[in-house]
Amino acid sequence: MSAATVAPSTAPGYTGRKDSHLKRLRRVEGQVRGLQRMVEEDKYCIDVLTQVSAATKALQSFSLELLGEHLAHCVVDAAAKGGAEAEEKVREASEAIARLVRS
């Protein structure tokens, strides 16, 4: 099963906090729209960069929280089952962490 595919009987670890996550993502979306307006209005470069930094930090914070939920739910469940599924979930989590560190 690929990371993008979820079996119908399996809910992602973030499902219990979906509303909160969607609220945070909408806030980030608003920040990005604000950036677009700033560029359209020829705002000062440093002011735009400050807002880029804020949006970036908001996405990083969201991604770390989502990763924590993934580890606590998906990886722990797979580890309890053992075998190839556990190895796959650990590999996926390691790759996700590496991507976050590089970004």
Image (cartoon, rainbow, N blue to C red):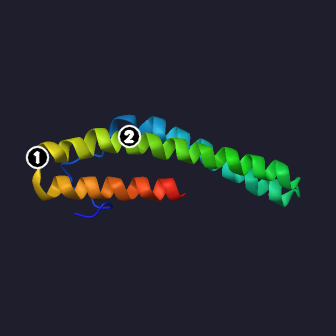
Q: Give me the disc on residue 81.
A: 1
Q: Can residue 30 be seen from the camera position used here?
A: no
- Residue at image point 31% right, 57% down: 92
Side of 75 relative to 82 (left or right):
right
Give 11 or 44, whichever is nearer the viewer. 44
Placement of 89 over or under 21, stated as above or below: below
- Residue at image point 22% right, 58% down: 88
Quadrant for the C terminus, please: bottom right
Residue occupied by mark 2 = 68
Side of 8 relative to 27 (left or right):
left
Q: Residue furthest bottom?
A: 2
Placement of 78 over or under 85, stated as above or below: above
Give 3 or 95, whichever is nearer the viewer. 95
Question: Is label 2 in a helix, a strand or a loop?
Answer: helix
Give 78 or 5, whichever is nearer the viewer. 78
Q: Earlier in the sequence, mark 2 or mark 1?
A: 2
Q: Position of residue 63 (x, y in %)?
A: 47, 47
- Residue at image point 81% right, 59% down: 39
